[in-house]
C-alpha cells in the first residue's frame, strides 16, 4: 500500500496532497487512514526502505553491452556528473544550498554510469553545497582495475588522478584552467607556454598535438596532454564568458587565460599506443550522454519539481522517481541496443522517454504485482518504439547518441 502511494506520488507532474493520498488509499485498498497517519509514515524507516529498493535494483541490473570496438580496451567506461536544483528553503538544515543570492536549500544528485555494461555505478542524493571535487575524493573505492573514468572539470583533483593510476585504472578529463603545466627539459621542469604552443600549431597547420607533461606546482604528476585548436566561434564564446565573470569579480582576464581559451585541453593516462590523440577528444564527448540523462530527468520526469514538504517525504519522492527513471532507462537501453544491432538505426531517447512518461501508469501496475504483466508492457513498448521513435540524423553533424556508438578502429 505504501509503495502504491509512493508510485502514485512520483508519476504525477506535481506531488499529491495528503488528502489525495487518503482518497486513493481508500479507493484502491479499501483502507481508511487519516492525513496525519500518512504523514507519520514518511519517516527515516520509509527513506531507508525506498533507498534499499533503489539499491537492490541497481545491484541487479541486466548487463547490456554496446557495439563499440574501443570499449574492449577497458573493464568499464564510467562517466560521472551531477545535477543540482533548488528545494524549499525550510529544508536548508538538512539540504543546505549555496546561500547568498543563491537558494538557501538545494539538492545535488551524483550520477555515475558505465556505458559499456549499461549499469548505474553510483547514484546519491546530497546537499547542493557539497562540491563535486569532494565527491571525487570520497568515491575512489568505486573504481576498479582496468576502468576508464571520464569526468568534467568540477571533479578535477590531482589526488583523485593519482589514486586512479595507482589502482591500475585510467582517467580522462579536461584540464583545469588554473592548473600549472610543465615539460621536463634536462632534468628541469619548465612551465608550458600556451601562447607559444598555439602559435607553433597555427604556423605548422597542426589541428591536434599530443605531448607528455607534468601537472601540479609541487608534485609534478605525469600525464598525457592532448591539445586541439579551437574554432574561432568557440574561442569568442569562451572569452565572453570569462570576461563577464572577471568583470563581476573586479579582475582582468590574463593573457595566459586567453591563450588557453584558444585550445581544447584534455589530460589522460591512457597510453598513446592504446588510443591515439585524435580519438581522445571524441571519447570525452561521450560524457555528454549524461547531460542527456539529466535533461530527461528534469524535463520529462519532473525530478526537480518539488513543493514544500518534510525532509523524509522529499527523500522518498526523489528516490522513487529515480527508481522509475532507472527502470525506464534500463528497458530503453536494452531495446536501443537490440534495435541498433538489428537495423543499424538508433532510437531517440527524447522521443522514447516522452512516450514512457505519458504512459507510465501502464508500468505502475506490473511493479505493484510482482512484475505480473511486465512482458505485456515490454511488448507494448517495443511496438511503440519501432513505429515512430527513431533518431533523426542531422546533415554533416554527428549527434550525441551517434557519438556513443562510434566505432573507433
Image (cartoon, helix red, strand yellow):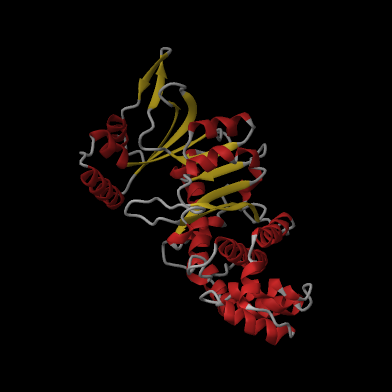
Q: Position of residue 49 (x, y in %)?
A: 70, 61
Residue 178 percent coordinates (x, y): 36, 34
Q: Residue at x 64, y 52 (%)?
A: 116
Reply above or below: 386 against 60. Answer: below
The answer to whether 251 appears left or right of 18 in the picture is left
- Quarter occupied by the N terminus: bottom right
Give the vertical position of 43 relative to 181 (above or below): below
Task: Identify the residue at horizontal 27%, vertical 50% (top origin).
Answer: 241
Q: Position of residue 35 (x, y in %)?
A: 61, 77
Taking depth in this image into account, of 43 and 322 the one nearest to the observer is 43
User: In percent of the image, x 54 and y 68: which residue is there?
Assistant: 349
- The quadrant where residue 324 appears: bottom right
Question: Which residue is located at x 20 percent, y 41 percent?
Answer: 250
Reply above or below: 84 against 159. below
Visible in this render: residue 398?
Answer: no
Left or right: residue 246 compared with residue 49: left
Amino acid at each position: 500500500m505504501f509503495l502504491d502511494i509512493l508510485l502514485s506520488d512520483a508519476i504525477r507532474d506535481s506531488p499529491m496532497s495528503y488528502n489525495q493520498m487518503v482518497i486513493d488509499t481508500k479507493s484502491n485498498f479499501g483502507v481508511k487512514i487519516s492525513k496525519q497517519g500518512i504523514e507519520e509514515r514518511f519517516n527515516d524507516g520509509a527513506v531507508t526502505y525506498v533507498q534499499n529498493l533503489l539499491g537492490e535494483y541497481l545491484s541487479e541490473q541486466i548487463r547490456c553491452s554496446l557495439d563499440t570496438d574501443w570499449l574492449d580496451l577497458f573493464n568499464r567506461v564510467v562517466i560521472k556528473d551531477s545535477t543540482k536544483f533548488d528545494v524549499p528553503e525550510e529544508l536548508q538544515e538538512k539540504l543546505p544550498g549555496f546561500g547568498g543570492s543563491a537558494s538557501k536549500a538545494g539538492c545535488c544528485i551524483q550520477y555515475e554510469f558505465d556505458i559499456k555494461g549499461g549499469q548505474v555505478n553510483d547514484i546519491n542524493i546530497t546537499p547542493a553545497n557539497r562540491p563535486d571535487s569532494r565527491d571525487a575524493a570520497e568515491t575512489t573505492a568505486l573504481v576498479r582495475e582496468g576502468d576508464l573514468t571520464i569526468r568534467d572539470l568540477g571533479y578535477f583533483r590531482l589526488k583523485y588522478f593519482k589514486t586512479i593510476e595507482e589502482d591500475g585504472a585510467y582517467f580522462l578529463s579536461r584540464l583545469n584552467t588554473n592548473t600549472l603545466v610543465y615539460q621536463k627539459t634536462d632534468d628541469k621542469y619548465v612551465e608550458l607556454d600556451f601562447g607559444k604552443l598555439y602559435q607553433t600549431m597555427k604556423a605548422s597547420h597542426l589541428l591536434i598535438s599530443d605531448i607528455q607533461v607534468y601537472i601540479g606546482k609541487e608534485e609534478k604528476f605525469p600525464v598525457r596532454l592532448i591539445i586541439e585548436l579551437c574554432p574561432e566561434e568557440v574561442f569568442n564564446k569562451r572569452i565572453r564568458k570569462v570576461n563577464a565573470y572577471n568583470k563581476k569579480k573586479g579582475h582582468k582576464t590574463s593573457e595566459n587565460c586567453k591563450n588557453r581559451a584558444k585550445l581544447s585541453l584534455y589530460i589522460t593516462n591512457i597510453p598513446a599506443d592504446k588510443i591515439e590523440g585524435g580519438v581522445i577528444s571524441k571519447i570525452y564527448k561521450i560524457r555528454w550522454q549524461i547531460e542527456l540523462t539529466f535533461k530527461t530527468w528534469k524535463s520529462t520526469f519532473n525530478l526537480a519539481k518539488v513543493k514544500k514538504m518534510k525532509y523524509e517525504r522529499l527523500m522518498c519522492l526523489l528516490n522513487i522517481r529515480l527508481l522509475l527513471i532507472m527502470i525506464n532507462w534500463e528497458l530503453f537501453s536494452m531495446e536501443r541496443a537490440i534495435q541498433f544491432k538489428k537495423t543499424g538505426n538508433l532510437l531517440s531517447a527524447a522521443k522514447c522517454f516522452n512516450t514512457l512518461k505519458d504512459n507510465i501508469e501502464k508500468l505502475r501496475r506490473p511493479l505493484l504485482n510482482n512484475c505480473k504483466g511486465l512482458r505485456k508492457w515490454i511488448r507494448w513498448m517495443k511496438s511503440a518504439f519501432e513505429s515512430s521513435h527513431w533518431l533523426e540524423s542531422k546533415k554533416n553533424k554527428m549527434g550525441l547518441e551517434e557519438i556513443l556508438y562510434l566505432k573507433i578502429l
